[in-house]
């Protein structure tokens, strides 16, 4: 179970507030000499969130946020913006279970007021529907977590992609990124049930351990989506993202991630290099990246042509040849030793 201290720590770490340091003696000297103090900041959750939202408002993100609208919502009692903001707070606080929201987030008056709820709504809730059927005490906060879960999923993939692209453009214009950046391409499965409308299906191999400790591999069918994204190396901020069905291969969408990232960063930041694993490896796309003026770094097997080409370029003075040695343990668990190694080559076009 997470505590309030855990989620507060997550908030501070994820917003990366590391630029301040405590110096009581220096502060006392400045106050004694009646020198002006630059600013006074409160390190409370509400104050940190307020400063963060103020920054987003200054660079133009909040208006984009407020323009979001879910599909098919009837009898709307709360602006959709408030659902998105509360779910964003859940992410910032690192709250894992949605049923933990009433205790860890919805009871936080400062955060809920920042999301647009007044004191009466915080105390009594948005409405009293089915109030007479409720068993036990009412959970704290203006809404129940089920209401948030039921409404946040009504934001379409197209709307989320457009919103993300707009936010990256605002961040680039605000000079959050360096002048030249490197992007990392990667993907992750988002599994759902088979009843999720529009989801795909794929076969995956899973390892199971039986009661006797024997490990065996089986094939299972999974349902859901795959989230593909390009992340900036230094800040870990997404530069572009795309949602596809879970069975779709990553290599088919490399250009659909690189091109939006370049567009989002245009005129302010230059995308210099792209890093990705073998899931995105395709010769035609590597040549396309070269034509776009982009370098790339990708792990490759020793017997692949791209490895031979990279080594030939390095031997001709266009790069460097490097080898990373992996220690391979052999034998049983109690006698295994590092008596082997495997070379892993990295093909790099600079």
Image (cartoon, rainbow, N blue to C red):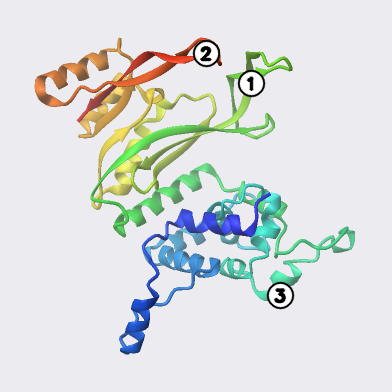
Distance, label 2 to label 3, CA atoms, is 67 Å
How far, Cα to Cα, is label 2 from label 1? 37 Å
Residue 40: x and y, percent?
42, 77
Above or below — where is 348 with respect to 268?
above
Q: Residues within 10 Å of mark 3 (few under 14, many from 20)?
A: few
Q: Disc 2 or 1, which lies upstream in sequence?
A: 1
Q: Earlier in the sequence, mark 2 or mark 3?
A: 3
Q: Are marks 2 and 3 in contact (CB under 8 Å)?
A: no
Q: Is residue 83 visible?
A: no
Q: Which element type, helix, strand or loop, lies under badge 3?
A: helix
User: Which residue is rendered at x = 73% and y = 64% of the image?
Assistant: 140
Extreme residue in the front direction: 335
Where's residue 92, x and y in %?
Answer: 53, 54
Residue 18 at least partly seen:
yes
* Front in this rendered view, residue 11 or 274: 11
Q: Looking at the image, which is closer to me, 85 or 315?
A: 315
Is 327 or 241 nearer to us in this picture?
A: 327
Asked which secondary structure carries label 2, the reply is: loop
Q: Which is more toward the observer, 139 or 228?
A: 139
Q: Which residue is mark 1?
A: 221
Q: Secondary structure at mark 1?
A: strand
Q: Is residue 349 left or right of residue 128?
A: left
Q: Is residue 289 above or below residue 103?
A: above
- Residue wearing tag 2: 335
Residue 240 on image: x %, y %: 39, 42
Q: Residue visible at 88% across and 58% down?
A: 135
Residue with the mark numbered 3: 120
Quadrant where the C terminus sits is top left
Q: Is 308 placed left or right of 332 in the picture?
A: left
Question: Where 204 sits versus 168, above or below?
Answer: above
Q: Mark 1 or 3 closer to N-term?
A: 3
């Amino acid at each position: 179970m997470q505590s309030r201290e855990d989620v507060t720590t997550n908030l501070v770490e994820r917003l990366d507030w590391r630029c301040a340091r405590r110096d009581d003696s220096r502060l006392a000297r400045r106050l004694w000499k009646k020198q002006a103090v630059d600013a006074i900041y409160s390190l409370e959750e509400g104050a940190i969130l307020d400063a963060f939202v103020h920054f987003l408002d200054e660079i133009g993100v909040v208006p984009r946020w407020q323009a979001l609208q879910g599909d098919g919502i009837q009898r709307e009692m709360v602006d959709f913006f408030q659902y998105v903001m509360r779910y964003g707070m859940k992410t910032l606080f690192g709250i894992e279970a949605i049923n933990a929201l009433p205790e860890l987030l919805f009871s936080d008056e400062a955060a809920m007021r920042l999301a647009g709820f007044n004191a009466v709504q915080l105390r009594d809730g948005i409405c009293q529907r089915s109030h007479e059927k409720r068993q036990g005490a009412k959970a704290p906060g203006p809404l129940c977590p089920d209401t948030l879960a039921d409404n946040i999923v009504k934001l379409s993939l197209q709307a989320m992609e457009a919103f993300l692209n707009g936010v990256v453009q605002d961040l680039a214009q605000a000079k959050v990124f360096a002048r030249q950046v490197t992007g990392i391409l990667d993907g992750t499965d988002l599994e759902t049930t088979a009843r999720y409308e529009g989801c795909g299906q794929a076969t995956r191999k899973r390892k199971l351990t039986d009661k006797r400790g024997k490990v065996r591999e089986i094939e299972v069918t999974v349902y859901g989506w795959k989230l593909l994204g390009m992340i900036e190396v230094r800040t870990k901020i997404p530069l572009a993202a795309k949602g596809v069905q879970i069975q779709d291969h990553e290599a088919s969408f490399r250009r659909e991630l690189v091109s939006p990232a370049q567009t989002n960063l245009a005129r302010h930041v230059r995308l210099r290099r792209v890093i990705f694993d073998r899931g995105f490896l395709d010769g035609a796309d590597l040549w396309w990246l070269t034509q776009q003026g982009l370098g790339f770094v990708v792990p490759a097997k020793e017997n692949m042509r791209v490895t031979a080409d990279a080594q030939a370029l390095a031997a001709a003075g266009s790069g460097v040849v490097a080898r990373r040695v992996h220690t391979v343990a052999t034998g049983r668990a109690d006698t295994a030793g590092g008596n082997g190694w495997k070379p892993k080559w990295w093909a790099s076009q600079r």
